[in-house]
Amino acid sequence: MKSGHRYTIEVQPRGERQAALAYSGTLDCDDAKTPTKAIKINQVAYSSLAKQRYAYLGWWAGNKGKVDYAALKRFEVIDEKTGKTALTGEVKLRAGDEMTAKVAGEEIYEMDIAALPVGRYHIRIPGLGCSDPLEVGGKGFHALYYHTMRVFLHQRCGQELKEPWTWVKRPACHSLIYENGSFAPEILIPGQKNPDPRRLAPLAPDAKPRHFRGTYHDAADCDTFTFHLTATDKLLKLYDLYPDAFADGDLDLPESGNRIPDILDEAEWCLLGFIALQYPNGAVPLGMANMEDSLWHRYEKGMNPWKKDCNVTPPYGIHLPSPDSTPTFAAVAAAYSRVIRKFDAAKADRYLAAAQKAFVYATTHTAEQVRKEYETDTINMKAPNYGGGTGEGALEGCCLWAAGELLRATGKKEYLDYIKANEKHMNKMNWHYAEQRIWAFINADAADPALREKYRKDMLSSMNGVVKDTLATPYRMPYWPTTKGCGWWGSMQGINSSLAFAYGLTKDQKYLDAMSLQADWHLGCNPRSQAFITNMGYRYPRRPEINPVLYEKPLEDAGGKTLRGIALYGIGPALNDWFGPWPMHRSWRDVFGDGAEVYSEFTIHQITGPAAAFYSTLYVTEKKAGTIPPNSKPNPLERPSEGHVPVW
């Protein structure tokens, strides 16, 4: 289209079945005013401290293929406040090979905007149009910190949601459990029928109820697991690195006002549930099942490995210990005891004692012994990857992690001796435990200096690889595929929180630059020109896989407004249309329902924790630089706005 021309757009349906598609409208094209999402920008906030900062140009037109923008040579950046040109530059082709077409469906052009100071702008490409407004620095970073952190609050198990903490209203869930682990039937959503009582494990005549609080749910699921504690661990690391950046009351939590930074209150919530479930011998259950997910979905649809090995549905309620559940708890409880001590010594002592007891159990039982101790006639714990555990290797690797945190918390030589004797097992851990396994050694004063330096180099070497991969890909995100596929679950949000800890450890600019570039991808600099965080930016997910009560209209269509700040799995497997497969990095379904999880679901340990750590770090850097204006904290009772407007 040409600037200065008016165009008429008409859609003429074929037959009665397509009548709803009828459309007629006009568009006045003005390349100084007409926005186009073909100009990809970070829709929330660019880092003001990054030395590398870009916007991109490109589009895929379905069966028409890539749009040709080769004739567009120059761009200009307009200051939104003054209306004056703040920067001009060249539109450069960055990637246009066959692989780029397969992955993105387009040729990718870049525009270097690193020279822009703090402010609010839009990009204009003469002959095409302009971008949505973009911001360098500013209060968008406060919104990113606040909303990604408060996803934890809304996924709490056993927590009532109400004013003044949130506009969402929900009674406390799963707050009553029985001795044998069964939950009391509850109405989780007003107007929802009680679950079929025949699906619950029978209670003993003298079963005693007790109240329960703690742990987190994933997405729309209601089960909870100890591997969610890896997200808790990220919050503790953040506080370690920036203790002066986080305050009591800055997240508007139920605990706000207790003189403890909110980030530490949130860090306790998951631990709170598992310390209550710890067995007298020190073992810690893997988590808890639930009537909504575990019985009706996982077991009956054959999605849990133990279904293959037994025909009897497991008892409803508490998952038994897995090989790595106990040492995972030991590691995080020890870390929490250390950071909470200056605020509450009695609480610190309680968590440290629980961590030490768990460590003793974990280091005196093999994975097979754990199974034999807790296996029952109806639960075959020999099933592959029982309940998320990963066998002997996970046990040994997590015991080393726990030893490191106990060494840092106590300074006792016995934990250093354990580490040295078992160091060969250091890498036997799940991928999402990456920086956890060595962080304590790097920072423990009582650790062997040579050992500390060895693992410091190990961590930074890994992160240097992430930086290299980020810079090498067309959109500067670390997971550009070179073979069929698009990445594993949880990876395609395109951000890596381990970079945040590498930056915190070294303050090396290259890690901050890589974080900034990854945030740009996540917040709009991608083939879809879309942010992958709910209600943040201009184009964002509207129907994520969450508990329906967290939608504005839960009993109608799980629709309407929902929470801000939920980072999702992101790009998924290539979709197919009548003309063939979509490009991999354009494949996205904004859908609530079975089968959409790889696109619109999220987990606490893979998505929520990493996103919160990632954006909290960027928030801290901007806060220290003074780019965030005062009084920029969002209102917890403000519902997300509708329409094409940024959240702040």
Image (spheres, rainbow, N blue to C red):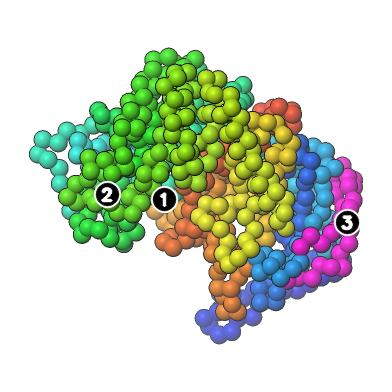
Q: Which circle, 2 or 3, is nearer the viewer?
A: 2
Residue occupied by mark 2? 381
Q: Which residue sits at x=40%, y=38%?
A: 396
- Disc 2 residue type (three-letter): Met
Q: Which circle, 2 or 1, is nearer the viewer?
A: 2
The N terminus, quarter of image: bottom right
Q: Which residue sits at x=46%, y=24%?
A: 416
In the rendering, which numbered label is found on residue 220? 1
Q: Which circle, 3 or 1, is nearer the viewer?
A: 3
- Pointer 1: residues within 10 angstroms few (<14), some, or many (20+)? many
The mark that comes first in sequence, 2 or 1, is 1
- Disc 1 residue type (three-letter): Ala
Q: Which residue sits at x=47%, y=61%?
A: 596
Proximity of marks 3 and 1: CB atoms separated by less than 8 Å = no
The mark that comes first in sequence, 3 or 1, is 3
Q: Which residue sits at x=58%, y=54%?
A: 492
164 is higher (above) or lower (below) than 609: above
The mark that comes first in sequence, 2 or 3, is 3
Return the x and y of residue 491 as percentages of the image width and height: 55, 52
